[in-house]
Image (cartoon, coloured by chain):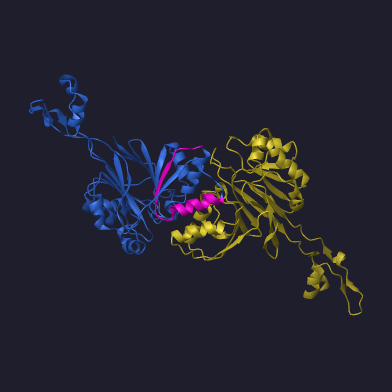
Chain colours: A yellow, B blue
Amino acid sequence: MSFKLLILGSNSAAFAHRRHHTSQLLNIRDHHFLIDCGEGTQLLLKKYQIRLSRIDHILISHLHGDHYFGLIGLLSTMHLFGRTKDMLLIGPPGLKEIISTQLRYSETSLKFKINFKEFTPDISEIIYDHSKYRVITIPMDHQVPCSGYLFREKPKKRRIKKGMVEKLKISKPEIIALKEGKDISDNHGNIKYENKKLTENPNPSFSYAYCADSKVKPELAEIVKGVDLMYHEATFTNDMKNRATSTYHSTAMQAAEFAKLSKVKKLILGHFSVRYKEPDPILEEAQTIFDNSALAIEGTNFIIDEK
Amino acid sequence: MSFKLLILGSNSAAFAHRRHHTSQLLNIRDHHFLIDCGEGTQLLLKKYQIRLSRIDHILISHLHGDHYFGLIGLLSTMHLFGRTKDMLLIGPPGLKEIISTQLRYSETSLKFKINFKEFTPDISEIIYDHSKYRVITIPMDHQVPCSGYLFREKPKKRRIKKGMVEKLKISKPEIIALKEGKDISDNHGNIKYENKKLTENPNPSFSYAYCADSKVKPELAEIVKGVDLMYHEATFTNDMKNRATSTYHSTAMQAAEFAKLSKVKKLILGHFSVRYKEPDPILEEAQTIFDNSALAIEGTNFIIDEK
């Protein structure tokens, strides 16, 4: 099982240089998570041929327009297309009021139910707990309540070596116990199947951290430590450090230092300021600190997979 | 002085067939009015190289998303670009609450002032009175409070025939009186300048009517009677008449009959249903009733000018 991340938009604030506002689509075990939803995101989903019916979870980091102005339009289009499946909508306090107010004035009663979950700012909490993975909030440091999201698969079960079930005629209850790492005894209390002989280590559990708009915040390293892939905003290069600080944003160098500190495996940089016609200087700067860095270029897929 | 109307978007409900949601830009005497503002309108303004700073008036017909979801993004971009000029924002009750709620949660204090004017549904009122023209609401018949807008130049002054001012040495107060249609007398009470000999008829006063989403409503003919140009929605062709009625929309035939009844000079049809990959059948149907019909194709300019 792999994680697949599609970058839909990567620009900060205004549309510029053919770059759109922030939005990403994460696919975990065929569960699709739309992360942030700037104006026009539904057009980008159309462009990349993503069927809207596949998206059952939308996560908004904060209520600056470049991260959510496309949400009401997307929900409306889903309604028009006849969606009836529930939608999980996670975001900051206020999001429900904004969406509800707009639906009220358009006298729209959606054909599907929205399950709103508003995160608690400034703390890290498990905001969505699936049997196979968790989504945990990452409290960012921005001008308004803002949260990143950590997607972390739960530990997987051990794998029984190929052919062993048939060869030894292992029973179903025994299979379950072996996958949980237990040794199996016979009726006399002696070891019948030694776990380490019959099983292999579980598949790795993958993780992706989306660190939204923020001043760099080293204390978050504990939360995102060792993730396979981390997106971190890098609005500016380091010559603009003062401006980054005053606007509660990060530089490429700060993002890269944070990636190094957090020992993540790969870093993606995004939320480029309109001042960068091409974002290459942001990548170059980050790579002086953290080599395995990449840019959140629209249309790019990042895949976390087994080696 | 001409009116110039640029069609930015013309589709109803969902984005489809490369058509965008409803939006138009009307230029009267270099005053720019943005009429409706579906999602992505700011991108269309960019595409057609319209400087955002020129737009000082925005009019929203109703609170269905395809007519206003791009508004908050446009206002935010104007703010980011440093706008300080006031903006007149006309729309239905509720628009102020929606915009204010979004600005409150983003903790944005706009650098410019928005003068909100919410129209009174179901009546026709002068919503904006400029010295040279008026904007009058047209009460449509839709599922939610909805208003069209009639832009009508005020009667212009008479024009003094070429060379006469110099030839007869007409004084400034006399010029003003002549332009107002008066005869000028000498000190003995005799006619000094006969108005009809010295002046010509005023330039024509132009008018444009934007008839937004609605069931056809023949009683509006009195309001839009004889306008130079009328946009009327024509979501369907007449084989879909029942659907048009049940969704409070019009067919091309109904729009054309209304244009004929109202004795308008030219009709523009728009708000095409997604069922029409090409809107030609809508035009063909309308032209069987009202020959001077045209489609609201994106990027088209309609100009009302002196002959």
The answer to whether residue A40 is left or right of residue B189 is right
Which quadrant of the figure has residue A201?
bottom right
Farthest residue toward the front?
A: B187
Query: On screen, B136 above or below B198?
Result: below
Residue in the picture at 63% in, 51% down: A146
Residue A69 visible in this rendered orientation of the protein = no
Q: Position of residue B100 (x, y in %)?
A: 49, 51
Q: Nearer the viewer, residue B235 or B94?
A: B94
The answer to whether residue B129 is left or right of residue A296 is left
Query: On screen, B156 above or below B276?
Result: above
Residue A91 visible in this rendered orientation of the protein = yes
Q: Nearer the viewer, residue B70 or A249?
A: A249
Q: Nearer the viewer, residue B12 or B99?
A: B99
Q: Position of residue A129 (x, y in %)?
A: 68, 63
The answer to whether residue B158 is left or right of residue B237 is left
Which quadrant of the figure has residue A290?
top right
Q: Is residue B285 magenta?
A: no
Q: Position of residue B210 (x, y in %)?
A: 32, 49
Residue in the picture at 34% in, 53% down: B147
Q: Magenta stretch?
A: B82-105
Farthest residue toward the bottom?
A: A187
Which quadrant is home to the N terminus of chain B?
A: top left
Q: How many marks?
A: 0
Q: Is residue B98 magenta?
A: yes
Q: Position of residue B149 (x, y in %)?
A: 33, 49
Which quadrant is home to the C terminus of chain B?
A: top left
